[in-house]
Amino acid sequence: MTPREREFIARLCAAKAGLKVAVDRDYLIETRLAPVARREGFDSTADLVQALRERADERQVWAVTEAMGQGDTAFFRDRDVLEGLWSDVVPALGGLVRVWSAGCATGQEIYSLAMLLEEQRPEGAKVELFASDLSERMLEKAQSGFYSQFEVQRGLSARRLVRHFEQKDEAFVLSRRVRQHVRWRRVNLMEDLARLGEFEVVLCRNVLPGLTEAAQERVREQVTRTVSPGGVLVLGAGETLPAGSGWAAVGSLPGVYRVQGGRRAVA
Amino acid sequence: MKTCLVVDDSRVMRKVARRILEDLGFEVAEAADGAEGLAWCRAMMPDVILLDWHMPVMGGLEFLRRLRLEPGGVGPKVVFCSVETDLARIAEALDEGADEYIMKPFDGEIVASKLAMAGLP
């Protein structure tokens, strides 16, 4: 792919989903787009780009955008944060606790919480789990509950593997009992999120760094609006909210924020 | 410095494990089977043992059972590291007292993650 073709892809992804695509990472772009080109019947990624330039077929545009937006995730990533959320934050919220994993990729984060729900139901709280991603393919994989040997070894303890998974040929399949706790939806975080309603816990971890600066601002503003009064927003362990945003860190859990003074504000 | 004993009959696997563990800050010793591993433990109990399943002379499960009966043998964290991927076998290893389980092949990230889950820094 030429630099001009990569720049075209970067502009397309930024316009559609606010994605920040580094144009100098030619290997990454090629790796992500080669399967799309094959599926769509093109001989090369260059041919795919050419077709998109000549006639922006909406389905192909989204196939490319979704492929470039694939996030990396793992079971129990930042284990202390998820377990602290479960043992301290969720019970303290009490009542109905709706949890949304925004940008869930292949689902390991929300399934980690579903496993915790199976193992220990928080006292005084009724938990509902929701997850969304931009990519239909990611969501399909997440819903299937099929994970490779490599994936189940990243962050998942052997005891949880034995307890919550079954074996199917070379893959490991999360039990139906755990899977049934989660409801899925395709969501482009750049669109109006008001239709989703409110959540007591919103996890938007390691999503913002993958967006352009303008998109980060928009998504941050939109996502914070979905946090119910008194609820918490959970960012990646290394992510912070801008100073003066009205959000304050909760306890010692990195990346967990609550509106200062209990009043909802926009970050 | 924490010590790790790698018990595996494959020299290549021991070498790969050694490199990863040394990068993680462990002092590493090697044994080619369970019997050799037990002798090493009787001389000096390590903090953690990376243990293969199938080995000549004495396999991993028998090593583990005997280790736990040794004075100080409940101390080391034992992480199985095997080509066995059957969930029933993994459950068996845990029931026998293993702290964690790694399915081969593995990389440094997996080893670090599993050691952390076994309670090691």
Image: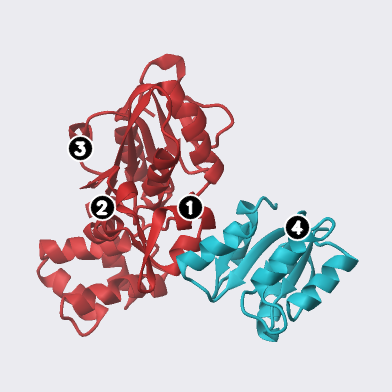
Chain colours: A red, B cyan
Q: Nearer the viewer, residue B26 or A206?
A: B26
- Give me the chain letter of mark 2: A
Measured as percent of width and height from the top left, residue A199 is found at: 31, 30
Q: Quadrant of residue A74?
A: bottom left
Nearest to N terminus: mark 2 or mark 1? 2
Give the foreground label among 4 and 2.
Answer: 4
* Labelled disc at residue A134: 2
* Residue that carries the numbered disc 4 in the rendered image: B76
Q: Quadrant of residue A11?
A: bottom left
Q: Are marks 2 and 1 on the same chain?
A: yes
Please tell me whether residue A212 is drawn above or below residue A46 in the rendered image: above
Q: Quick check: marks 2 and 1 in contact, CB under 8 Å?
A: no
Residue at x-position 84% and y-position 71%: B40
Mark 3 lies on a secondary structure that is loop
SS label for mark 4: loop
Tell me, yes or no, whether the two marked residues, 4 and 2, touch with CB atoms within 8 Å.
no
Residue at mark 4 to residue at mark 3: CA–CA distance? 54 Å
Mark 2 residue type: Leu
Q: Residues within 10 Å of mark 2 (few under 14, many from 20)?
A: many
Using residue A119 as the reference point, say whether residue A5 is left or right of it: left
**Can you identify the residue that label 1 sits on?**
A160
Q: CA distance from mark 1 to mark 3?
A: 37 Å
Mark 1 or 3: the one toward you? 1
Q: Residue at x 16, y 75 (%)?
A: A40
Q: Amino acid at mark 4?
A: Pro
Q: Which type of secondary structure does the marked residue at label 1 adopt?
A: helix
Task: Give the distance between the C-alpha atoms of the residues marked 2 and 3, in whole angstroms.
Answer: 14 Å
| Subunit that carries the residue with mark 3 | A
Callouts 1 and 4 on one subunit? no
From the image, state whether disc 2 or disc 3 is nearer to you. 2
User: Which chain does the residue under circle 4 lie in?
Assistant: B
